[in-house]
Image (cartoon, rainbow, N blue to C red):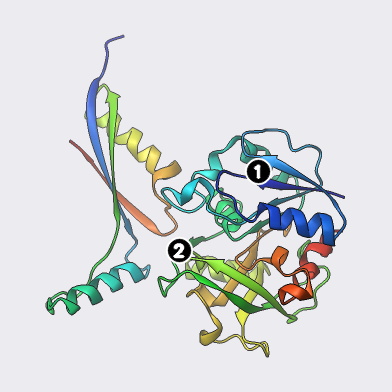
Amino acid sequence: MTKGLIMKARVFITLKEEVLDPQGNAVVGGLKTLGYHNVKDARVGKMIELELESQDRETSTSLVQEMCQKLLANTVIEDYRIEIV
Amino acid sequence: MKWGVVVFPASNCDYDAYFALKNILKCEVEFLWHKERNLKNVDVVVLPGGFSYGDYLRCGAMARFSPVMEEVISFANKGHPVMGICNGFQVLTEAGLLEGTLMKNKTLKFMCKQVWVKSQTTQGVWSHNTEKNKVLKMPIAHGEGNYFVTQEKLKELEDNDQIAFRYCDEKGEVLETSNPNGSVSNIAGVYNKNKNILGLMPHPERACESILGSEDGRVLLESVL
């Protein structure tokens, strides 16, 4: 079997739109205190960078999708977006 | 009646639970180490409070994959009584044994104080000793106790009588101001459909002696005896 390529995947995890983000609100408050009154909203999320070995981008994407469903995101409150670099 | 208290790395209410069960309820208790798959023939399992696996990724997300949890999940699915307190509640939602999830407190603050909760059902295995609408005083100590479920799921929980406790004031009024963390519909604890698994943010094990401010936690723990 040929060895796969090493790929980097980035997973962006954000709270679903309908879920309140008190951290984001605190960030807005902080920015306003600093004088950035044009900031209307902020949403705090997290980014996970994975290095993985795989045959092609498609396989990587579906693998990472599986990982998001099983562990990386809590789909009750979070959305995720995957980027293969 | 033999109790098992699960110990994850960074559980910190495991000894509180052990003490309450052993010294106050006078029950047989065993610690269940997270790496073990052996539940030591216990009749009841308690998932204690703490910060299992450093709360990495999300509270309870890592603990759910520890070897002992495989056994706890099958134990729970067989209908045996399981209680998840605080971090234990978070583990149960992450494991998919209970609906919803626990988010950061609305205030962003770690809340550590006595609260009052109103029992919403007498149907669950942990509620046999309570009357409906009974007001219980127990402490909370958490940063992530903001219970969230979609409106659709909330309706399901209500229809199935799965809501165990709601935060209220001393008189039993369920008010916005008595909600310490922003939980949907003031929810402090929920059951699974079968009502053998209870998850709650307040600590019944820390409310078993009047010298600690309340004995109301015994009502829950003694329900399964």
Left or right, B151 with respect to A38, comes to right
B152 and A4: which is toward the camera: A4
Q: Residues within 10 Å of mark 1 (few under 14, many from 20)?
A: some
Q: Earlier in the sequence, mark 2 or mark 1?
A: 1
Where is mark 2, residue-wise? B103
Q: Amino acid at mark 1?
A: Ile
Q: Position of residue B37 (x, y in %)?
A: 68, 33
- Residue B39 quadrant: top right
Q: Is residue B107 left or right of residue B131?
A: left
For the residues labelled 2 and 1, say whether their Cβ atoms are less than 8 Å apart. Answer: no
Q: What element does badge 2 sit on? A: strand
Seen in the picture, residue B214 relative to B6 is either above or below; the reply is below
Q: Nearer the viewer, residue B188 or B51?
A: B51
List the single residue furthest toward the front: B211
Image coords of residue B117 (percent x, y): 66, 78
The residue drawn where x is 62% and y is 86% is B169
Distance from label 2 to label 1 (Cα)? 22 Å
For residue B73, the mark is: 1
Residue drawn 33% across the image and 37% down it: A64
Q: Quadrant of residue A23?
A: bottom left
Q: Vertical placement of B21 versus A41: above or below?
A: above
Chain holding disc 1: B
Placement of the C terminus of chain B among the 4 image quadrants: bottom right
Task: Tell me the tag on residue B183.
Answer: none
> Which chain's residue wears label 2?
B
Instruction: Residue A47 in the image: state x and y as whole percent.
Output: 27, 48
Evaluate whether residue A34 shows in this view: yes
Identity, as a three-letter code, of the amino acid under mark 2: Met
Secondary element at tag 1:
helix
